[in-house]
Amino acid sequence: MKNYLHISVLLALLLCPLLAAGEDAARTDPIEFQKRNRLIGYMLAKQLPTIHLSDKSMNDEQARAAFTLYLSQLDFQKRFLLQQDVDQLTAFAPYIDDNLLQGNNSLPDAGMDIIGERIDQTERMVDAILGGYFDADAKEYLETDPKKMVFARDLKELQERWRKILKAEVFTRYLELEEESKKTKDNKNRETLMQEAKSKVAKRYKDTFRRLRQETRQDHYDRYFNAVARSFDPHTNYIPPAGKEQFDISMRGSLEGIGALLREDDGFIKVMRIIPGSAAARQGRLQAEDIILQVAQGPEEPVDITDMRLSDAVRLIRGPKGSEVRLTVRKADGSKDIIPIIRDVVQIEETFVKSTVLPNPDGSQVGLIYIPSFYRDFEKTSNGENARNSTDDTRNEIIALKNKGVDGIILDLRNNGGGALVDAVDIAGLFLPSGPMVQVKNSNGSVRVLNDDDPEVLYEGPLVVLVNAFSASASEIVAAALQDYRRAIVIGGPSTHGKGTVQTVIDLNENIPLLQAGNFEDLGALKVTIQKFYRITGGSTQSKGVEPDIPLPSLLESLKSGERFLEFSLPWSSIEPVSFTPFTG
């Protein structure tokens, strides 16, 4: 959707003097930074009400909903902000809708300044508390559910909250160390164990506060924009440029880089594991436990990544296939090495469909197909290229299991959060003749039936579908279709997640008039809910999910995980069923 007229109006606005709010943002950030973020906010305020499935408007009520989410993201556990801080920020709430249209982003600026000061105060507080004494005999109560808590009235109350938090963590560590000491028989005394417990907790929070201090002003703006988007429903999001890259990687199951899993360790970037078959594995010199000190792009000057955020370091190390990256690393023995690696495509094997054969005592065999997500490389597909996708991989695994003579197949959709709608329809169709698989309703009320047009049934034998509370979206389409056709027995927890909506991803850069396109850095993307899907029997999976034919007790029940527990989720509804013929084999 092109809103060039609206965007042109805003581009004129962006040439005006910057709006003041609290601390003048122009003094702390470049003008281009402010212009870019004003444009993003304006786009969200204009496009969300127009594109979103619901009939929500960007009004005062929606602004308050956005503020609720923003505050939750800023300090979800209520461990930093005081009530007076919340009161100060709440004053911005009714004006979020107007401010977005006017290019005024004063709320995230104020939020960053306030939370930054409180984080510094809290860090000093934590250091002081850990240097003191914890009374093991005093019985105390610590509320851990943020929804049952209120923000601290003052610093004294906040310090008392942290004292209980740290006491609980220290004694938990103490008991773990005591158990280890008994096993190793090193006879450490209580004082030594307590000191070690405090040291471990202190290190954990040192890392936590370091990561918090690394947050940039752009991080705060992105959090604010995401709160605005999520106020329409839990699956509508603002995706910053780095997030868009990660989203694409998760959908296609591959990336371009060196093939090393990394983690932060006390301010350093450490190699956890080398992915077999990757560029790093073929080169051979980079190893697990190596610490990466510097990153250089080919012959360019290296960049020191000590104390750099993991996400920022990863962006430096990744790069186009065929390009060179030089890593300066410190080995476990203390020696240094400069390792040149030519980047290549890295396949994330955990993403892809897999199968195995489960033998039974009676000699029969059951095939198990695990589908972790419904992945598809949309970019390659749209360009007419052959791209790996979950439908083709599932088809290949079914054929392989049939060749092994299995007596039945289990389709494991547990923890599958969804993916490409087309693959949900096509994978369900592998077990059914041609016919309707799911219905999709747009915001204008029109309903479209998505059919599997292939009359071939690839597998006609016994079929079981495994689900749990984390089976969502496209997983629920497959489970519901196979259940409605009486093609499979669905087994799992009391119900699936209950995400019955369809999203599209809009590149915000495509909304800028061509003449202005080069004036802004990447604006990111907007993932927005545009449709709701319905079973062929007429009921939605939204909120209710899919109820298994054989429900099993689940530990996940206590987690209250599901669409119905998410703020601002859309309600259940139903439409007319479509005609279909149950599967008879």
Image: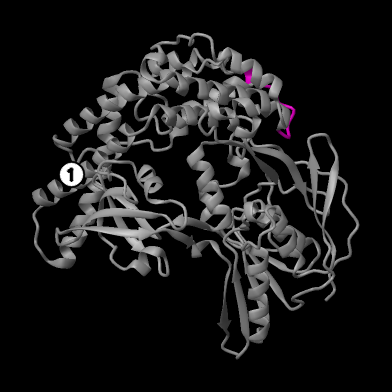
- Give the vertical position of 290 relative to 310 (above or below): below
Label 1 sits on a secondary structure element that is helix
Residue 176: percent from left, percent from top: 24, 55
What type is the residue that disc 1 sits on? Lys
**Could you say which is closer to the camera, residue 284 or residue 553?**
284
- Give the vertical position of 487 relative to 22 (above or below): below
Q: Residue at x 65, y 19 (%)?
A: 8
Q: Residue at x 43, y 13 (%)?
A: 88
Residue 524: percent from left, percent from top: 55, 35
The residues colored magenta run: 52-61
Magenta stretch holds residue 490: no
Q: Is residue 197 visible?
A: yes
Which corner quadrant of the image does residue 152 belong to?
top left
Which corner quadrant of the image does residue 353 belong to?
bottom right
Q: Residue at x 74, y 78 (%)?
A: 461
The residue to which callout 1 is attached is 198
Residue 215: percent from left, percent from top: 36, 32
- Secondary structure mostly seen in the magenta stretch: loop
- Give the vertical position of 458 relative to 426 (above or below): below
